Amino acid sequence: MSMTAKSQRGVALLTILLLVVSITVVAGSMLASQKIAIRRSGLLFDQNQLLQDIDAGQQLAVTMIRADSNLNDTDSIQDIWAQPIPPYTLASHSVSIELRDESGRFNINNLYQDGSANTTALAVLQRLLTQLNLEPDIAIAILDWQDADGEVYQDGGDESTVYAQQSNAVATDALPNQPFVSIDQLLEVTGVSAETLAVLRPYLTAVPYYVPININTASPVLLAALIEGANSQQMQSLVDMRAQQALTSIDTVWQLPIFGSLNDEQRKALTPMLAVDSQAFMALITATDNATVGQARERFATVLISKTVVDNNQAVNSSQTANNNQASNSSGVDGKMPKEVKVVTQRLWAFRPSF
């Protein structure tokens, strides 16, 4: 055999080997890509399933509040929504729900309503801050953060300049001058540190509409802030009374000795701020993928749910609207005011939020 033939055979063999190696590499790459695609598809499916679980938990929370609204016109710790809700299982996933009454807290968005400052609400917040050993001027800063003008309330100075001087910072942009979306935004307010927010968090909420304080669920500290010079110990009689039975009227409060010092004008100013029912609830929903291999995956959501009296003067001419109202609103039974329960906002979290 000539050298040329041997050389050609060697080249052919080398070419075949290179082709085999190339095919092996390409096949391995395709297999790896396929595994990644399958894994990604599985993760997306699990994430979508967790989101569906959250929606199911949200619907259950709304249903519970709506059912309780059908039973009575008050909201208290004895009600259905206030009881612990055991987790329930959906296939390999589990869903847990925690419900909290936002009307048992002070809504910082109450400070500025209908284009003007609510002086009664401002005074209550200032007294609450004082009880918590915090600076009452923080209430003014919270009001200025959301009011429509660029001047410090009752001072007249430019907001951005004054607050920059107080915090030893350089004046930059003007304040947002809009309602708060979350309590966490208080960290942007002059005078509010992380430590201050931690003290305030159990007593405050940020609901985008006016929310009266529910005297059946408010803490003794917040109740004491309703009256100048009062303390939480003096509110124990009210706490004991509502523990036996939910208060059904604000008039019951005025009959308590601690409130006897209020004159008619003070009672008139406080009355719109108080209620015996709740107009806002917050639900924390946790969806868990109980994986048999590896660490279980979790998704969280906070859901703001409103419960407000139905305006029968709106959209009553449409039969479709009437059907929708019948499906989504609490019914007015035995003279009770019909109320609409609906989701206002849903916020998703990768980690469990403060609640």
Image: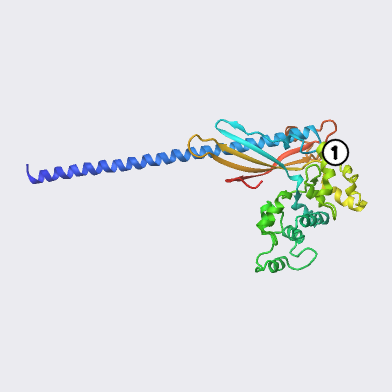
Counting the numbered discs, the total is: 1
Residue 19 horizontal/vertical position (percent) = 25, 42
Residue visible at 76% across and 68% down? 157
Residue visible at 78% across and 37% down? 339
Q: Residue furthest toward the right?
A: 264
- Vertical comparison of 342 with 89: above or below: below
Q: Residue furthest toward the front?
A: 233
Residue 8 horizontal/vertical position (percent) = 14, 44
In-image side of 55 versus 261 (left or right): left
Residue visible at 59% across and 31% down? 89
Is residue 274 in view?
Answer: yes
Number of residues whose C-alpha sits closer than 10 Å to that of mark 1, classed few (under 14), some (14–19) or many (20 or more): some
In-image side of 228 versus 188 (left or right): right
Tell me the SS state at disc 1: loop
Foreground of the two, 155 or 179: 155
Name the amino acid type tagged 1. Answer: Thr
Give the image's coloring scheme. rainbow
In-image side of 319 versus 188 (left or right): right
Foreground of the two, 3 or 151: 151
* Occupied quadrant, residue 188: bottom right
- State which quarter of the image contains the N terminus: top left
Residue 287 horizontal/vertical position (percent) = 59, 38
* Occupied quadrant, residue 280: top right
Q: Which residue is mark 1?
A: 248
- Vertical comparison of 285 with 108: above or below: above
Is residue 245 in view?
Answer: no
Residue visible at 76% across and 50% down? 106
